[in-house]
Image: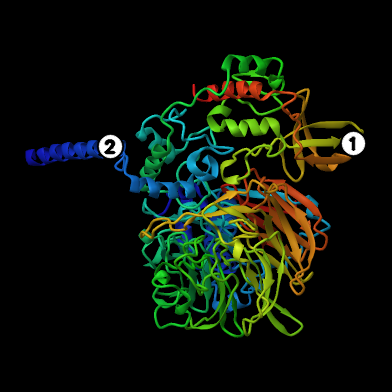
Amino acid sequence: MKCDQPWKSGPFSAESGARKKSRGFSPGVAAQGLKPKIKSTQRGAEASLFHAALKLTFAVSLAALFGLLFSAYAAAQVTPDRLIDASKEPQNWLTYSGDYSGRRFSSLDQINTTNARSLTAKWVYQTAATGKLETTPLVVDGVLYATAQDDRAFALDARTGRPVWMYQRQLPQDIRPCCGHVNRGLAILDDKVFLGTLDAHVIALDSKTGNVIWDVTAAEYQKGYSFTVAPLAVKNLIIIGVSGGEYGVRGFIDAYDALTGARRWRFYTVPGPGEAGHETWEGDSWKVGGAPAWNTGTYDPVTNQIFWPTGNPAPSNRGAGRAGDNLYSNSLLALDADTGKLNWYFQFTKHDEHDWDATQVPIIIDSAGKHLIAQANRNGFFYLLDRSSGKLISATAYGKQTWSDSKDSEGRPVAKKEASPTLEGHTVCPGALGTTNFMAPTFDPQTNLFYVTSRDQCDIFSTAPQPYEAGHAYYGSAYFPSDEAEPYRGFLKAIDPLTGHIKWQFEHTSPTWSGALSTAGGLVFTGDAEGNFIALDTTTGKPLWHFQMGGAVYAAPMAFAVDGKEYVAIAAGSAVYAFGLP
Amino acid sequence: MRNSFLRSCWGATLFFFILLARSKADDRNPFANDPKAAKAGEYEFRINCALCHGLGARGGGRGPDLTRAQKKHTHSDAEMFQVISNGLPGTAMPANGTNGQGVGMTDEEIWQIITYIRSVEVKAPAKPIGNVAHGKELFYGDANCSLCHMIDGKGGRLGPDLTGVGGSRTGESIIDSVRNPSRRLAWGLTEATKEFPQEYETVTVVTADGKEIKGVALNEDNFSVQMMDSNEQIYLLEKDKLRSFKKSRESMMPVFSADVLSDKDLDDIVAYLVGLGVK
């Protein structure tokens, strides 16, 4: 279903004929395609010089206009190889985290510490939707693709913010997203963009028109399944993880053939009878065990492994009835990209009772010949793993936590008995929202620092027994701000991933839900709950520039370039903003 | 043609009756007085409502005591259903599913919660805890409350407007705020229900020209602060242009200990405020 209002008022309403002619052209080809038209106009000049001059002016203007429109619009195919080498084309932003490593780093340096103070807003695109925007845009050859509430997707001219196409899914009334009608973005491959929907479908849209190419049902939304994650395109597959940990779903990660939409594999994050790990669930609790996979993982093309994080076991705050470790909830999974076969797993929080989904983006880091993967976890610890084996290297608290004061033989923080929620309730830190959450972190290979948004907050956790009923909330808990708690505090923290040491921290006025972006310009960008977009010095954490966007930030920034000019974009309130130098 | 007209008429009539039946069903609590539903409702209440209304529905810092038989906004079960479903614009009461505390409730679950609330209501009206008329006199007189607090447009501006406080807070929490004003400045700790996050923190700044200003923060971000001093003067300041900026959770409201304001006088003031809340 296309929302046709902005389409009609958009640049193509008067140019549809020309659009057909230049379909599929790259910028250079688009200009060539217009040449014959100019020539034929010039032939008409023999009749009347004045008339011809007028015509020529008109044609040149038209050509210039078309050139402008289609140089941005007519993207070349995004091949799997381009995705692997995404960091070699920093003018584009090809995956949720920018490249497969998950580091959300841009090697563009035109905007840097010396000129950041002169950044200005270049355009604002209002989505005409209400609620939170959690999207990270993609940019391919001058076209920006992003999503908005209620499964809207749109393509914009990345230089002007003018829409090229818009799509909005017709969602059923009774969808069951847990935490707002949100979406975190698209994947792109070949000439399609891919969207996971709130009614648990995966769809492919034509990247040039927004037309639906294929649409497959992944699960029954009536039972609480939904998608909010930005999928990840790997080879010819679209990898996507499901949401629904609040409804007692049985979590999974799926891979779909990008061309046809046929499902190639599914990895259930809760093992069934006969499968390894099934014994970590009491009785039939596995059937409604949760362990969703609602944030985008990363990919190592060298070993052909996908690293995908998983969420809480269900019910999230009540461990009674699901005795055991509850694999593979709150884990990092290393899956073979072609088959979905599990190579290794690491469970961050065993038998979680505090809703501490481990769904934070795991970042691939190579250091001194070591193949590492790092995650700042919702439970308040920063984990560094060997990504060839899944073996834990270190776990260091990076925020206020009271749930663990010891580690097991592997070095994994172990929960204190008294951290379990009770019927009366008692205080545990971090609170249910976690030290961090879905806010995308960033790793800067120039400073070797890992930047993450964090929150110090404690909650009173109390249990509230809830029977499972399909499609009904199933989290078995209530949590409250603790009376004893200090006011909540929010930070951007710069962590040395090898030591877990916090090099600097920037305190926000209040906790923020914004992710962060680092760039080769020595800048780390983030947003705040008060609506500011902020550029900080990556080495010191000193704020160098800010802009008041007028709406709280729930999204993560990204960077791109068009016509040699660098932009930084972020969603705030109900709009997408792009900033650049004057 | 006539057949099709008749069919349309029948269709419309049937549709009307279905609508009527449905709206009637929605008006009546299908679980009224069902103890099993009340128990289910108790857990739903914990999950969805207790954050503001407190465990046991006895009220918290931000939500009224729902065990009072006489409520400000709702009387019938149907009205309660509407308020839970749609929220109360202009108050901290959010629409179902929008409070950031997880998913929305089904109609059935809302009815269960209503059944639970009815089961814990204290049927006999509580004895007035104080003398309302004397409380009003103190509020505007010797206790000096109105120097900083406004009721129905009359009073000071530095502290929170207390017109609706009796409807949203329990007597106990009001007493606590008078005796220990810094314990929790404002109960707006959860972002989900605070549209405007004023928490009445005390701010002391020194401007570039050396002037010290002390007041209450109206709003603040990383780079600016909007504040009001005790003369009700508003200051709009950029932090990087200040010589110093200090924020404290020591309230500007003085501590009213029992030797300054007796328990009896405080009860009278609370009776006045709570009385306003249910009028």
**Residue B229 position in % (x across, y down):** 78, 28
**Residue A378 position in % (x across, y down):** 62, 63
- Residue B208: which numbered mark, if any? 1
Evaluate whether residue A146 shows in this view: yes
What chain is tagged by disc 1? B
On screen, A228 above or below A190? above
> Between disc 1 and disc 2, whose residue precedes?
2
**Residue A363 position in % (x across, y down):** 65, 72
Label 1 residue SS: loop
Name the residue type under label 2: Ser
B150 to the left or right of B83: right
Q: Residue under circle 2? A: B23
On screen, A488 above or below A313? above
Q: Badge 2 local density, few (<14 within 10 Å), some, or many (20+)?
A: few
Residue under the image location 72 percent in, 64 percent down: A398
Evaluate whether residue A46 shows in this view: no
